[in-house]
Image (cartoon, rainbow, N blue to C red):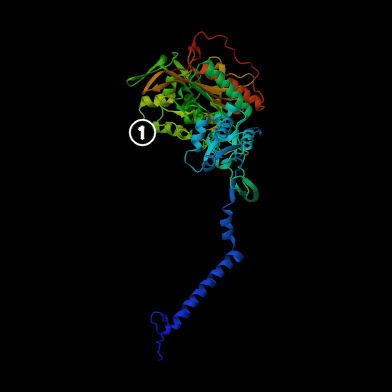
Amino acid sequence: MIRLRKVVTFNHNPLLQLSLSQWRARLVLVVLLAGMAALMGRSLYLQGIHNEFLQAKGEMRYARVLEVPATRGRIADRHGNLLAVSTPVSSIWALPSDASQLEPGQLRQLAQLLEMNVTDLNARIAGGRDFVYLKRQVSPELAEKVAALNLPGIHQQNEFRRYYPSGEVMAHMLGFTNVDDRGQEGIELAFDRLLTGQAGSRRVIKDRRGQVVEDVESISSPRDGKDVALAMDAKIQYLAYSALREAVQQHRAKAGSVVVIDVRTGEVLALVNAPAFNPNNRTRLSGEQLRNRVFTDTFEPGSIMKPFVAAMAIESGKFRATTQIDTYSGSFNIGRHTIHDTHPYRTLTVTEIIQKSSNIGTARLALEFEPEYMWAFYDRLGFGSAPGLGFPGEASGNLRPAKTWKPIEQATMAYGHGVSVSLIQIARAYLAFARDGDLVPLSMTRVDAPPVGVQVLSPQVAHEMRQIMETVVSPGGTAVRAQVSGYRVAGKTGTANKIENRRYVNKYVSSFVGFAPVSNPRVVVAVMIDEPSGNQHYGGAVAAPVFAQVAGGALRALGVVPDAHRAPLQLIAVGNERALGEGGL
């Protein structure tokens, strides 16, 4: 018997039948081929034509761009003597992720070299940051010792540290920089943009421990900062600082300041304050020491303002140097107020008012003018406005609007009360007497060509005021101790009570501002001593001797030919302090 089998073919199985039509299958094939071609093309492009991307990704694993620090510009005096330079140092830093593997013995070695406590060092490394400085600005020798330890995660970078060869003598003039070599005070801050250079960069190869194994190339060269040549004369600066420090110590004063200006150019030849500080070591310093009082501190100038009132009176044509003024025997009433002179005089000429420093005589001159007229004159002299030297902390002082003045206030402003100035302002104003009645802008840097001045007095009045102010240092004046051997000098003393809680107290600011030689003035020297104590506080006894030392030294340093042949008066003893006193307080 023959049995028939049923043959089943797979072609008739609906589950195995082709689900895509023929055109769709071809489309999928084309898409796959196109994607493969795109990948091959991209690979060819990246590896053969534009391979910077992959190279950059690779370099990220081993290449680094390091900053190359620029050297800060140097500061020199007018003769080229270096006053501030940058010396190479190193800073020690760590990558905590790597440095955390240091063994206790290695930590102790590192802490000993860095003069740190092991606990503090460990706390810095374990602080959870990606980068941490361990110690900034260490010497190259110490940096080499740290590098010799070959510790993982401990690295170095080259930096610069500012060094000031003259120390505290130049401290307030130069100022200082911070740990990042940026100016913080003084010239360093005022000229920071000019002194600061532009850092460069270089590409290096580092190993997995972060150590540089190859210097590949320089990307950009650093541009060093520009040098600054100051108008300052280092020799005159040292003389001024020595004389001021001695006076502050002798009179047990709170502080003091001196500024020396070249009459011809307006250049600041010296600027000193006491107490000072060492800019190379500024640990545990207070604001009192850091403050540049010449610019930032204002005070009631007292009698050093009197020559301006006399000049205003003579310039107006209403008065002459020989005009006599009744000073009412030392007591003068203005409304309910009374003005006094230290010594009672009946009648004084305008010259004698300045020589004897009469408050009453000066007040009577001032009251002959409208407040607006006197205010305008003070304003032209620069009072009430900042000097504009760009020095940090410049004070403008206080000169109230004339419409607010009462007669008693106008009278007291004539002899320096009710108005405040800085020492640099009063020194510049005295240039009008030392020059031919014009004022020139001051400069902290060297001036090659004489500047153009602004006329505030006629040349004739300026010349006459020199002769009047010369009597102040002559016998019978308030400042015979300001005399300088071989030179004719002129100036004015000042003694003003200080104000505390809106009341005048028995604390004084003693001052003297003058110029020399009278025949052809070359320097203006302004001296201020804050709160002298002891038996003397008048400007003629406290500040005038400082002027004599500084002016004499400055004139000799500048090679100025003497214009007098008489020696200064030597006051062996002063029995009565008032013999050198101003006309009043």
Quarter placement of the C terminus: top left
Q: Decide which of 154, 272 is in the foreground and name it.
A: 154
Q: Is residue 535 above or below residue 266?
A: above
Left-right relation of 486 to 501: right
- State the residue in front, 57 or 506: 57
Which residue corresponds to the image point at 42% horizontal and 21% vertical from the top-left? 498
Tell me residue 425's x, y (percent): 50, 31
What x and y, as percent, mark residue 156?
59, 40
Between 345 and 174, which is closer to the camera in this rendering? 174
Residue 182: image location, x then y, percent: 54, 38
Residue projecting furthest to the bottom: 1
Q: Which of the two residues, 414 or 276, is positioned nearer the viewer here?
A: 276
Please tell me how crowded label 1 is: few (under 14), some (14-19), or many (20+) other residues with Cα within 10 Å. Answer: few
- Asked which quadrant contains residue 42, the reply is bottom right
Measured as percent of width and height from the top left, residue 541 is found at 52, 16
Label 1, secondary structure: give it.
Answer: helix
| Picture mark count | 1
Which amino acid lies under the numbered mark 1 shown in the image of this protein?
Lys
**Residue ID for mark 1:** 403
Residue 1 found in image quarter: bottom left
Residue 473 visible in rendering: no
Looking at the image, which residue is at 40% across and 87% down? Answer: 5
Q: Is residue 6 left or right of residue 549?
A: left
Task: Say which residue appears at 59% left-offset and 68% top-offset.
Answer: 44
Going by the picture, which residue comes out furthest to the front? 1
> Could one spot residue 26 in this view of the protein?
yes
Q: Residue at x 58, y 24 (%)?
A: 240
